[in-house]
Amino acid sequence: MSTHIAVDDPSAKTLLIHNPIVTILCCEGKAWLCIGEVNAIKVDGASVEEVVFGMLSEEFVSISFQVSGLRPSTSEEDTTAKLDWRTSTFPETTFTVPSRYVEPINPITASLPSKPSLLFYLLDSSFLNALGESLYSKLSVSELKSTPKIALSKDFPYREVGGKACFICEDECQISDLGLANMIECKYCDPLVALDTSQGKMVLEHMAAHIQHDPKVKKIDQPCGICLRPAPICQFYLEKSKGANGGDRIDQWHSICKHQVQFHYSKASKATTASPSIWKYNLPLHFKHTHLNRSLDGFPDLNWSLTNFEREEIRKRWVKRQATPRRVRKKGDEPQFVISDAHRSDGGGMRPTNLDVHEVMTTSHTVRFDDGIEASEHSSSENPESEHEGSESPASLSQVGEGTLEDQLEEGGFREDDLDGVSSVNNSMAALPSQTVPVTHAMGITSGMLHAPPAIPPASNPIATPVLPSDPQPAALSTTIPASLMASSAPPPQIVPPPTQASGSNTEMSGTCRSGRERIKQVLEIDTCVCGEVAGPRDVQRRPYIKCVKKGCETVTCGLCWLGNST
């Protein structure tokens, strides 16, 4: 029989045995990124030598892998000084997981000149952080519950030079403890009782107490021994264990129950001091309602009755059903490690988008953010002088884009409640030419440049509602203000008469602003209402606002001026 899966597309990428992969392991209740090497692939239970990437999301594909070590690389191992991690030896530890729990990778292979036959892989922190976040985000909470668990050791989680643990997997869900993710709640208890599904005997004992003593549970419904739902909602199938003397066990693949509890069927089928024989609680009723023409005397091998010992033990479980044992950590049993903030899967708050982890890892990484800003590791300025002249720091950008504009508007007569159009100016900044601004190291950006909007140019968009004049001249600006505001004690905006200029432009110079550029004050003439009616003459000094006399309009309009920086 062939051990290869037929692929229609010969160019399709495949995962082979001995290929490197990444997955997630649970250690001390936390999810950690793990590097592994594939040592077995199974499709529908049959061993194969390769499988295409497109089949890794299927449920019938499983991957077995050997855990690989990971430690910081040295300058001799990485001559480029860009790949700060390398694989290393690890104590023999093998896990088998569904194929959707793993991601294939294609890292750089390297070796030392003194030991050319000893190969290892080189990786960098930003790539590993992105892999951890991508893998962690695609797994559901129920899948994270079933991730393999590994004991804390000096080799795992992986550690940096300072000894801090690296590559913890987190996201906005903030699942604080995966060890508690296996807990379920008994809906028949008041208050609710938490049960650990990894402790199958405890779950069986608790449910057996409900079946025998809880009046809310009807035996005639033949309740499930794990979740107490009535038959035939839950169904269990048996299969033979491995080996010539293998007994029966639960076929988890075909069985149906809302709780996946691990236990040994052969041990649970017999009442012992450790667990009750919960399965025969429903057998008499099953025969009575399903096999009406069969007599119980015809099955002498089946022990239908409960012993006094089992009845007494179940009664004790019922009395103490609210007191569930909990594992208490000792004083010196706390995890002896510190998590590195620079090696978290969330990347310090920057979540990567559209990252294809199947691509070959290179020494250059480009990250595209949600707002369209692109950062590249190799982008640089060809003219250092122009870079310092035309670039601003992030702090100065925020001052130019927010504080400076608002201060100028306040100096020109604007109040905070009159700035309805400022947001439109900020939104239009995305269309302005960008300038290059240096950024710090994040997500693989070592000495890159970030394209960000420059300082605000002279305003070309109105900051208030435009009013069309009656005569052909540059459009004036106005804002509609309720009449109640004009009656307040606050003085109205000051109107500056326009200077006489040969060019006919309606501007005058008004000193310089804090950024060093000359400030322009533009006077706005208003003689038309928004409804189209001519408002008539007005006295600028005594009556700086007008009120439309058209019936039903009653709009009060005042003259405004706007400030901008000269080019």
Image (spheres, helix red, strand yellow):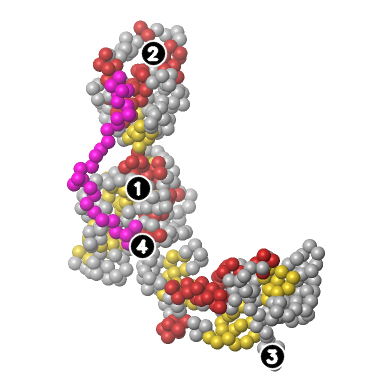
Q: Badge 3 is on which residue?
A: 500
Give me the disc on residue 176: 1
> In this rendering, which labeled residue sits more in front, label 3 or label 2?
3
User: Vertically, is 207 above or below 112?
Assistant: above
Q: Earlier in the sequence, mark 4 or mark 3?
A: 4
Report if the CB atoms under discs 2 and 1 are less than 8 Å apart.
no
Indicate left or right for 222 with 180 as reference: right
Mark-to-mark CA distance, 4 and 1? 23 Å
Q: Which residues are magenta?
A: 315-344
In magenta segment, residue 77: no
Give me the disc on residue 143: none
Report if the CB atoms under discs 4 and 1 are less than 8 Å apart.
no
Q: Earlier in the sequence, mark 3 or mark 2?
A: 2
> In this rendering, which labeled residue sits more in front, label 2 or label 1?
1
Name which residue type carries label 1: Ser
Mark 4 element type = helix
Mark-to-mark CA distance, 3 and 2? 108 Å
Q: Badge 2 is on which residue?
A: 284
Q: Badge 4 is on which residue?
A: 126
Q: Nearer the viewer, residue 44 or 333?
A: 333
Indicate left or right for 206 with 428 as reference: left
Q: Earlier in the sequence, mark 2 or mark 4?
A: 4
Q: Residue shown at 42%/85% (left/top)?
A: 385
Residue count near mark 3 (Cα–Cα under 10 Å), binned few <14, some 14–19, many ≥20: few
